[in-house]
Amino acid sequence: MIWVIVLLLLVLLYLLVDRLLRVFKIGNHSNKYVFVTGCDSGFGRELVLRLDKLGFPVFAACYTDEGRQTLTQVCSSRVQVIPFDVTKEESIQAALDTVRQKLPSETSLWAVVNNAGVIGQVVAAEICNKKEYQFCSDVNLFGPIESKGRLINLTSCMGRCAAEAGPYCVSKFGLEAFSDVLRREVAQFGIKVCLVEPGYTETALFHVDELHKGIREAFQRSDPEIQEAYGKNYPDYVIAVLTAKLERCSSRIEKVVDALLGAIVCKYPRPRTVVGYDAKFLFIPLTFLPEWVGDTVLLAYEKRMAKEKGF
């Protein structure tokens, strides 16, 4: 009994210290330059708006012309909006050159936030082709590897619990591994590497019509034997499960933005922040249990989603 009490006290002490450490914030935001990718919409856009209000000078990297135009209209002169395609080396180099030109002398970036990401194909792993795995990794994994500074990488709880399609989970697991390795390697230089791991959150990444179209196209081009094995109704099944999952997405993107902002402004940021009830109480806890437990729970969860939609 005494060991249970001691353990409980240690847990409470840890939680208290962890909370107290986040109270300490950095000062003088005006000389803390931040580079953020994926600012066209969602987490990236909201983070830039928050940083702008706090007085941070920001380099906001957008993929689309529309994203650059709309962000420029609502931000102050502290925000410099630049074109950026994380999959192209020449675009990365051009952005780097712009940052070097605009940064005051003897000043470096305070933080780099790797927010740009894609969902990728959401069908079974063997139906996805090599190109789909490569594209997802180019954006979600290899793009962030190009960055330097105080790094904040937006991954996903799917980077620790493979409960989604292959291309997405592979890219996020890779980014988790890279971040963990880098955090230990650069600690000696005083550089911090932080991970933010959201659960299902409603963002502009979920282009429903495009996802549905991609599911049907991927199935149609797959080998006839695979089509026979999964059955002709497989695309409808995947769409039904995806629809049920998206209906449960959290609409509170501010929670993710709070975590990203905390990694920037906290003097002692958390190395890893999990966001969302589904991530905290379902997906992440499953990673600590035997594999057969996780497999059983996730398969049951998927069947429940399908049943809700008539399958």
Image: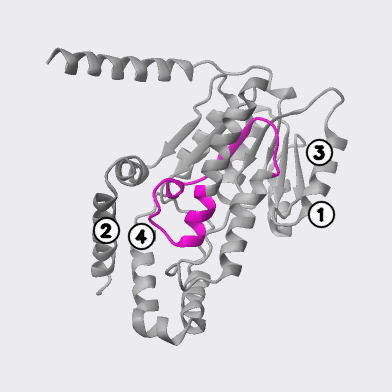
* Residue assigned mark 2: 301
Which residue corresponds to the image point at 43% horizontal and 50% vertical from the top-left?
158
- Tell me the kind of residue under disc 2: Tyr
Question: In this rendering, which labeled residue sits more in front, label 3 or label 2?
Answer: 2
How packed is label 3: few (under 14 Cα within 10 Å), some, or many (20 or more)?
A: some
Q: Are marks 3 and 1 in contact (CB under 8 Å)?
A: no
Range of magenta residues: 146-173
Q: Which residue is mark 4?
A: 245
Q: Earlier in the sequence, mark 3 or mark 1?
A: 1
Q: Earlier in the sequence, mark 1 or mark 4?
A: 1
* First-in-chain label (1 vs 2): 1
- Locate residue 59, reporting x and y percent: 73, 39
Does residue 31 appear to the left or right of 284 in the view shown? right
Asked if marks 4 and 2 touch (Cβ < 8 Å), the reply is no
Q: Secondary structure at mark 2?
A: helix
Tag on residue 90?
Answer: 1
Q: Within 10 Å of the Cα at label 4, are there few (<14), some (14-19), or many (20+) other Cα atoms? A: some
Q: Which residue is mark 3?
A: 99
Q: Nearer the viewer, residue 240 or 155?
A: 155
- Label 3 is placed on what type of residue? Val
